[in-house]
Every structure is written in C-alpha cells, then in structure tokens.
C-alpha cells in the first residue's frame, strides 16, 4: 500500500498534459481488459462478424454459434495473465497498444485513487473504467463515458457567462457541425439526441441541415467588459474563448462568431473519446455527437 500511495503522489505531481487519461483498475481487472482488447480483433477477423460494439462485451462481436468458443478463449487467456508474473507496466502497455491509443493510459489502483485526485462526488470510483482529465480543474477526473456531454455542457455555460461579462447583447446558435457527417455518418440523429444537453431546440431537413431556436439576450452590464476570476481558467485553456475575450477587450468589437467543442482539450481528441466511450447503443449517439461536434454562435455586443 505504501508503494501504491507513493506512486499516486508522484502521478499527482506530474504536469496535467502528461496524465490526461487514467485507468482505474486492479491487476485482475487489468488482465481481463488486456485479454479482451487483444483477442477482439483476432476473433473478429477470423469469424468476419465485426460489429461496432463495446470492445469488452463478447456478445457484441460473437454470433450465438461462436459465443462459447470465444468465451473459452477469453477465459483461458485471461487466467494466464492474471495468474502469471507479467508486470502491470507491461499489461497497461499492451492494453494501450491493442486499443490503438494515441495517449498511453496511466494505471491507478481503485483503493488509492481518491487519495491522489478528485472524482465526481456522486459516483464511486469504478474498477476497470477510464477517466479523463477535466479541462480546467487539473486535479479532477471525469468518467470517460460522461466526459463529452459533461465538458460540452460546462464549456457552453462558461461561454455564455463570458459573453455576458464582456457586454453581450445577444448570443445565437447559427449552426452545428460534426466529424461524423464529414465521414458520411448520420448527422441528424446524433444532433437531435443531444438537443437536451445544451437545452437547444433544432429541427433538421433530409440533407442534415438544421434550423435552430436558441438565442439568449442580455441587458447592458453595470461593470465594464471583463473576464471574471472564475472564468479565467476557461479562457486560458480554450483558444476560442481566449480569442473571444481578447477581441472584445483589446479591439472593442461589437459582433463576433465563436465556436465551442470538446475535441482537443488537453490533448484528448475525438478519436480517443470514441475509443473509450462505453455507453450502450442508445446513449452512444449522444456520446459521439458531443465528442465530435462543434457549435457555432453569433455574438452581438452592446456598444462600449
């Protein structure tokens, strides 16, 4: 336990950019996850039944006739790893390689996770789950499955508060784009699913184009345009918000166009988010939309 605590403290002392992804897992769970990740592409290739399902769910890629054989392979291989002397460092490296992570995950035991970092207080830390660094609170990690929706919501709230503090007269959503649509994926369903996340109402035509009914208006502020202390971390870490603040404060602009998104916050890109999302199919549409979308707003300010 003392060695584990020392490791946790060393991790906490690392710069945030060097620890964007945590895997909370004990050794047995790590062995199971590594086995699942490594046999998944082999079984999928041999049986030619690959489907876009959660990678640790065997029913997602094995038909009924092959389910038992796949489970036998998993059970045997997993037992070898659990009972063998393969180090945790080797296992986590193999897991990252099997999942083709662009950022190596950092392993942390569930028993000491709360001593090193903060997690959502309403949820217990879960064994065998990935957690992503919060873009602003650098000692706080968010469950990967909740990350896109959570950070999109918080970024939007920070953006609206910043607009008001800078003297905005109105903020209006003009369009939403997503990399899913750029690759030929469905744009309509994910964006309809995510409407409720930001409290935005949108209707879509057959081509995926949207009509948005989301506009906020503000009275003239008593204070001069400024960046409140509680929003400075957001401005410092988000390029679009920083540009928004600088243009208003230094150039006195009266109109602006600002985009917000989840991708590329502290090196956590949309591809990585897609790989570690672990929601069921119905929720995955919301997850993917939040992870890959950009929300474009028109801002009009009161004259200085």
Image: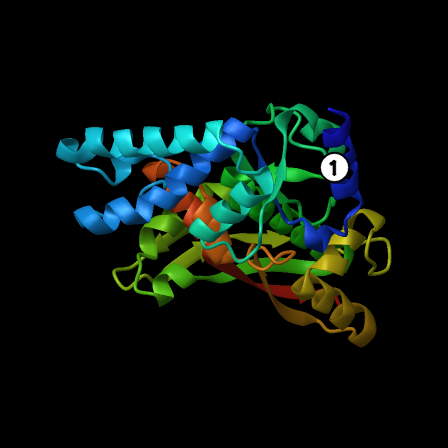
In the rendered view, would you say 86 is above or below 251?
A: above
Residue located 34% across and 37% down the image: 282
> Label 1, on which residue?
7
The answer to whether residue 123 is visible is yes
The residue nearer to you, when weighing 300 against 28, is 28
Residue 48 position, x and y percent, is 18, 50
**Which quarter of the image is occupied by the C terminus?**
bottom right
The answer to whether residue 200 is visible is no
Left or right of 8? Residue 199 is left
Residue located 61% across and 50% down the image: 156
Residue located 74% across and 35% down the image: 8
User: Residue 185 falls in which quadrant of the image?
Assistant: bottom left
The residue nearer to you, when weighing 287 against 27, is 27
Q: SS for tag 1? A: helix
User: Residue 60 falls in which quadrant of the image?
Assistant: top left
In the rendered view, would you say 122 is above or below 271?
A: above
Left or right of 47? Residue 59 is right
Bin the neighbour count of mark 1 within 10 Å (Cα to Cα): few under 14, some 14-19, many 20 and up.
some
């Amino acid at each position: 336990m003392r060695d584990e605590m020392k490791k946790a403290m060393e991790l906490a002392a690392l710069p945030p950019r060097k620890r964007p992804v945590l895997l909370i897992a004990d050794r047995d769970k790590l062995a199971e996850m590594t086995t699942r990740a490594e046999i998944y592409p082999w079984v999928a290739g041999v049986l030619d039944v690959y489907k876009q399902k959660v990678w640790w769910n065997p029913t997602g890629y094995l038909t009924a006739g092959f389910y038992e054989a796949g489970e036998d392979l998993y059970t045997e291989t997993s037992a070898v790893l659990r009972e063998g002397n393969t180090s945790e460092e080797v296992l986590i490296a193999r897991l990252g390689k099997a999942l083709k992570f662009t950022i190596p995950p950092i392993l942390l035991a569930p028993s000491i996770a709360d001593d090193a970092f903060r997690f959502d207080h309403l949820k217990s830390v879960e064994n065998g789950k990935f957690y992503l660094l919060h873009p602003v609170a650098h000692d706080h990690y968010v469950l990967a499955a909740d990350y896109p929706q959570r950070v999109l919501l918080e970024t939007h709230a920070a953006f609206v508060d910043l607009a008001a503090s800078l003297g905005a007269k109105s903020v209006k959503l003009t369009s939403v784009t997503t990399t899913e649509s750029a690759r030929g994926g469905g744009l309509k369903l994910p964006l309809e699913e995510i409407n409720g996340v930001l409290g935005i109402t949108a209707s879509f035509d057959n081509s995926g184009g949207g009509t948005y009914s989301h506009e906020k208006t503000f009275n003239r502020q008593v204070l001069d345009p400024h960046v409140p202390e509680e929003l400075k971390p957001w401005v410092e870490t988000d390029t679009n918000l920083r540009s928004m603040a600088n243009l208003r404060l230094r150039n006195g602009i009266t109109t602006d166009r600002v985009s917000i998104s989840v991708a590329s916050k502290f090196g956590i890109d949309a591809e990585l988010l897609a790989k570690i999302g672990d929601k069921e199919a119905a929720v995955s549409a919301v997850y993917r939309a939040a992870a890959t979308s950009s929300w474009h707003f028109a801002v009009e300010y009161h004259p200085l």
